[in-house]
Amino acid sequence: MTGEGSGTRDEGRGAVVDGSSRSTPGGPPQHHGGTEASASHHHSRARDTGSPPLVPRPSSLLPAVSVRDLRRDYRMGGETVHAVRGVTFDVVDGEYVAVVGPSGCGKSTLLNLVGVIDRPSGGVVAVRGRDVSTMTDKEATLFRLRNVGFVFQRFYLMPTLSARENVELPMAEAKVPRAERGARARELLEYVGLGARERHRPSQLSGGEQQRVAIARALANRPALLLADEPTGELDARTGEEIIRLFGRLNADGTTIVVVTHDEELARAAQRVIHMRDGEITRDEWRVASGERPAGGPPPASG
Amino acid sequence: MRFALASAALRRHAARTLLAVFGVAVSAALLLDMVMLATGMRESFREFLLVSGFQVRVTPKGTLPFDSEATIEHAGAVLAALRAHPDVEAVSPILGAQVHTLRGAHALTAFAVGIDPAVQGDYKLLRGADVRAPERIVANEPYFQRTGRQLGDTVDVAAGFDPQFRSYAGRRALVLVGVGQFYYTAADQPVVAVPLATLQQMGGPSRADRVSLFMVKVRDGARSERVRRWIEATFPKVTAISTETAMQQVEERLGYFRQLAFILGAISLVVGFLLVTTLVTVSVNERIGEIAVMRAIGVSRAHVVHQIVLEAVALTVVGTALGLGLGLVTARYLNAILSDFPGLPAEFDFFLFQPAAAWRSLGLLVVSGILAGVYPSWRAASLPIATTLRREAVA
């Protein structure tokens, strides 16, 4: 993983990584690094129960995300705005990456491009080795459904559905049988600590609870990648910490996370921080060594 | 899930949804009423003409039935010739005249038809007996009400009145034997039926062997138009009008009403369409962020389109169902008002519910509801996700 074109210093490890740093000795931890034991443990659990894991597990040696010379230009008021300018980096399976930078630096645009809800003006985005930048709308929709989980700053839950129904929505779209998706939705809500509130509507939940429902929804179809855009932006400090801990636990359980944030606490919790300014990566730093990655308890077995 | 989301979206603003449903219901009711009016008058007139099964009317040359006092001479011979035609099943001779029922110094003027009770097609006997004997008379309810007479009473009836001498001519004592419902006269008009020969005799020499009208029933399988042409060719002093000819004339005269009904019906259809489009568009605009998020988490365009079209269809179907009831009630009310119009036969309906036409028009409204949902749904499903989310966040 690297911010190519801008050699970056791995502050957490005191090492400089370059464009080939994914295979560089002393580079950033591969997914199975710090959580290998627990991940193996969970894999064993999954095999024992004959059920898939509740949260996704790294499944290949391919980068979870591979971005090459990515550009995104907008026409605004007759002028072209270069929101993302030739960005290159990789995210490996199980990594927890925070993208930080001032407002308007292009970090949300970058996240949208990685999440295939926006189209690049140039360059390539590959998720799990698959080029997603040239997909048709139908292919992109299906790809998002199966491979990407989104968490937004403003939660964006369906106000007319209960917490459980909100979590079921992506599964219903993926044609998961009703009983199965109900059971999984309950498990996911338990996982995010809202097992007792599954029947509540978003308006009956606090901001933090809504965001946890949104996280459960994002995990519904066991995505390869969890993308979050300012997930603590609408929350008070204490509630924000809960979400930060939840992200840490998710990552410890093997979920690959890319989060865009202004929240220093949230960025500090990530293993790696990509700094952006004016549409470019200015710094790509490792905050913690693999062995210090946030650890969470084992997730409940899925049904 | 689509049904749940569509239903929830409609319930989110219950008052607004209810108002829209009522709007569609009013639109559907108006459309139904216009269809009932456009087709109802024509069909009602056809039923009116065919109520007693006679397809051809024979009147004095250049006249319509009972629009003048003109009569057909040599009625007996004409009747015999008509009955002899192989395509003719029955012929009903009718003489129309005004008669006066005397009661002390007062007299009630009524319309009388002289008929052959064996083949008459002018009234339905509600109670009592028919006019099987010369001195018998059948009357309708308004006659009984205005004269205060009852079945079995003998009434003094005159066929003529000389205002100069204030004297009545052609007087007969007739026994009221039956109560009838007359098809072709106004509902509130007093009408009586007497045997044809009796009325001819009461009318004196000027009515002898004369009738105002022959009604001809054509045999099954025979063409009434052929019989009509034969009558006009054989009897130069008469006009023969078949039901088809009469219907053509009615069509021409009712064309204006039909056009009006068509235009009003089309307007109600457009209003219903615009109402649903507007409501669904407003609803979609309010939920644009939610829809963008649905798309972001992998919900397909087709799902979004289906869900929003379902909302439009639900509004239209519920509104149309309500409109069906509302339209029928309104039509009944309007029909009652119009039927009270002086001079109209009681049997004539302005609004006639014809299932095929009604379902067709209401089906059209439902189709318009579906189309009303297509535009906003496709617009919503086609919005750029990232841009929409960014705008929502800024908003």
Image (spheres, grey):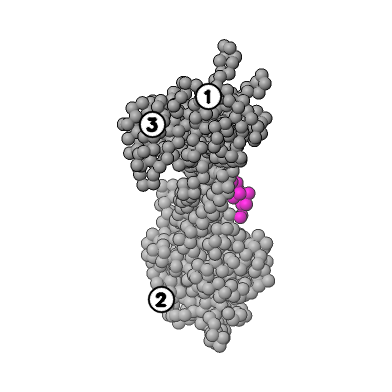
The N terminus of chain B, quarter of image = bottom right
* Element at label 1: helix
Q: If you read the primary sequence from the N terminus, does the residue marked by circle 3 or circle 1 appear first?
A: 3
**Most frequent secondary structure within the magenta stretch:** helix
**Which range is magenta?**
B11-23
Viewer-proximal residue, A12 or B13?
A: B13
Query: Is-magenta flag for residue B15?
Result: yes
The 10 Å Cα crowd at callout 3, few under 14, some 14 to 19, many 20 or more, is some
| Residues at marks 2 and 1 touching, judged by CB atoms closer than 8 Å | no
Whether residue A137 is visible to the viewer of this picture, yes or no, is yes
Q: Chain of mark 3?
A: B
**Identity, as a three-letter code, of the amino acid under mark 3:** Val
Viewer-proximal residue, B123 or B290?
A: B123
Residue with the mark numbered 3: B78
- Which corner quadrant of the image does residue A207 belong to? bottom right
**Identity, as a three-letter code, of the amino acid under mark 2:** Ser
Give x and y (percent) for residue A230.
56, 63
Viewer-proximal residue, B387 or B88?
A: B88
How far separated are the C-alphas under marks 2 and 3? 116 Å
Q: Which mark is residue A20?
A: 2
Q: Which mark is residue B202?
A: 1
Instruction: State the residue at coordinates (57%, 62%).
Output: B4
Instruction: State the residue at coordinates (38%, 59%).
Output: A121
* Element at label 2: loop
Give x and y (percent) for residue A212.
61, 68
- Judged left or right of residue A4, residue A300 is right
Please, is residue B304 above or below residue B369 in the view? below
Query: Is-magenta flag for residue A235?
Result: no
- Which corner quadrant of the image does residue A90 belong to? bottom left
The 10 Å Cα crowd at callout 1, few under 14, some 14 to 19, many 20 or more, is many
Viewer-proximal residue, B164 or A135?
A: B164
In the rendered image, residues at marks 3 and 1 fall on the same chain = yes
